[in-house]
Amino acid sequence: MDLERRTISAVDTTTGQKVAIKKLARPFQSAVHAKRTYRELRMLKHMNHENVIGLLDVFHPSSSLEDFQHVYLVTHLMGADLNNIVRTQKLSDDHVQFLVYQILRGLKYIHSAGIIHRDLKPSNIAVNEDCELKILDFGLARPTENEMTGYVATRWYRAPEIMLNWMHYNQTVDIWSVGCIMAELLTGRTLFPGTDHIHQLNLIMEILGTPRDEFMKKISSESARNYIQSLPPLKKKNFKEVFRGANPLAIDLLELMLELDAERRITAEQALAHPYLAQYADPTDEPVSLPYDQSFEDMDLPVEKWKELVYHEVVNFVPQQLPTLSSTIETTS
């Protein structure tokens, strides 16, 4: 069990609704942990979208700030995650369209708030029995303006610019992850199951080929540049061969998402308009977020001050009416 995060299911005795309760076990272990707790709580409170997990309630067992040690987050209880689904069943192309559409619909909302999720993977995407989907877990999320280190996200779904130490990467790191997830939905197999950073990079280049010169100039890590240049040139594989039998439109969208150069990679909003998703796309029902206040990110505070800020967020929390999935999206039959 993850010692940092423990989640159980429960029933709200007032509404009868099934919920998930996540305990942040050591939220105030250090100033870094405390700031992360405050960030995750603020982000969850901000989210109000059918395809993104939102906060139904938050509580603590303490009687005062002095003995405040634990935070419990209450969210919708979802069913299986995509990892379970990929491992247990073969998905139709229609199901893949619907799932990818919902992921991108949620991402458009998250990105419009100026937030990068940074940890998109099948186990962080929950699906209910009607194939309705929510993006979970903002534990690694960051505002887009912050400088970030390379060690985020599960390696298999990690964008190449993270491994190559681009410090100021952008929201399309999440799009790369969606591309990896979509490939897995289509084939039932992990696309780039690297055992370490080098193996991961090699697997990516085996399919996408050696990066262009313009891409190489953007790599800030000299050792990464030297390593790539030391390899024999590789040609990009034909995606029609890699994803044999897949819908040609799916293959086209995959190529746009699995673009090595982040500056050339498609955005969530652009991907939603791709012909592969045409049967679900509705620009009038793909909402964006209200502005997200990230001014606290530049604050350097001691643990006790972050703890006080978290405490006030918890005790002053007012539950909002979160939208339900089925209220705006017609599910697949």
Image (tube, rainbow, N blue to C red):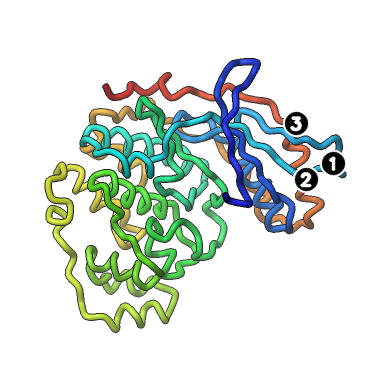
| Mark 3 or mark 2, whichever is nearer to me | 2
Sequence-wise first label, 3 or 2? 2
Q: If the image is split into quadrants, where does the C terminus sit?
A: top left
Residue nearer the viewer, 170 or 12: 12
Element class at badge 2:
loop
Q: Quarter-wise, where is residue 138 in the image?
A: top right
How far apart, in angstroms, are the residues tagged by discs 3 and 1?
13 Å
| Mark 2 or mark 1, whichever is nearer to me | 2
Q: Which residue is mark 3?
A: 316
Q: Which residue is mark 1?
A: 65
Residue nearer the viewer, 331 or 106: 331
Element class at badge 1:
helix
Sequence-wise first label, 3 or 1? 1
On screen, residue 158 versus residue 46, left or right, reads left
Indicate the position of residue 54 as horizontal and vertical percent values.
55, 33
How far apart, in angstroms, are the residues tagged by discs 3 and 2?
17 Å
Neighbor class of circle 1 (other Cα within 10 Å; few <14, some 14-19, many 20+) is few
How far apart, in angstroms, are the residues tagged by discs 2 and 1?
9 Å
Q: Which mark is residue 69?
A: 2
Q: Amino acid at mark 1?
A: Leu
Neighbor class of circle 3 (other Cα within 10 Å; few <14, some 14-19, many 20+) is few
Element class at badge 3:
loop
Residue 203 drawn above or below residue 313: below
Q: Residue at 46% across / 44% down in the picture? A: 124
Residue 21 drawn above or below residue 306: above
Indicate the position of residue 66 as horizontal and vertical percent values.
87, 44
Residue 221 drawn above or below residue 1: below
Count of numbered circles on the image:
3
